[in-house]
Amino acid sequence: MSTFALIFGILGGLFGLFVVFIVYLVVPGIAGWSGQSGARLVLLISFQLISIAIPIASLVGGCIAKSNATVAGVLMLLSAGGMLWLFGFNFFPFTAISVLSALGGALALFAHWRDRGKGAQN
């Protein structure tokens, strides 16, 4: 179960980073065309930094899914919610990103719960 959490977390993070690179290509062009400066430009740059940090959280959660399932599950679930908040409820972010990260997070938490139950039986 933790192997599936690892796979789903890493895939969700990679697809999330793919969408972030699309945002990096589109958002600076829009800011340059519209002549934004000052506080608006700082807002756009902070949006880009947050949009990088959220998929990286899913990647980190996927990478530590076997060693620390609870932290991995929480990171992937927070990443899934952050991606839905950041990219909106569209077809591509919902299906390719948030479902993978959310499923990976749920599987990691379930694997932790299942492993904890096994330790009590022995």
Image (cartoon, rainbow, N blue to C red):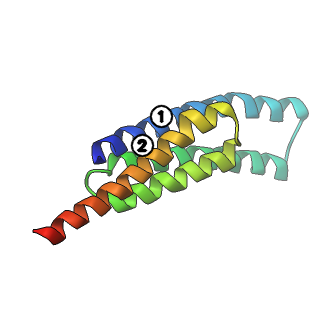
Give, as a three-letter code, the residue at label 2.
Gly
Between 50 and 45, the residue placed more toward the observer is 50
Numbered tag placed on residue 14 in the rendering = 1
Residue in the picture at 31% in, 63% down: 113
Between 76 and 109, the residue placed more toward the observer is 109
Q: Nearer the viewer, mark 1 or mark 2?
A: 2
Query: Looking at the picture, how far across and down is residue 83, in whole percent?
Result: 61, 46
Residue indicated by mark 2: 9
Residue neighbourhood size for the residue with mark 1, other residues' Cα within 10 Å, grouped as few (<14), some (14–19), many (≥20):
some
Give, as a three-letter code, the residue at label 1.
Leu
**Residue occupying the far front of the picture:** 121
Query: Looking at the picture, how far across and down is residue 42, in whole percent?
Result: 76, 50
Rounded to the nearest whole Å, what is the CA distance between mark 1 and mark 2? 9 Å
Residue in the picture at 53% in, 56% down: 78
Residue neighbourhood size for the residue with mark 2, other residues' Cα within 10 Å, grouped as few (<14), some (14–19), many (≥20):
many
Q: Secondary structure at mark 2?
A: helix
- Residue 14 seen from this side: yes
Does 116 sit left or right of 25 as displayed?
left
Residue in the picture at 36% in, 38% down: 7
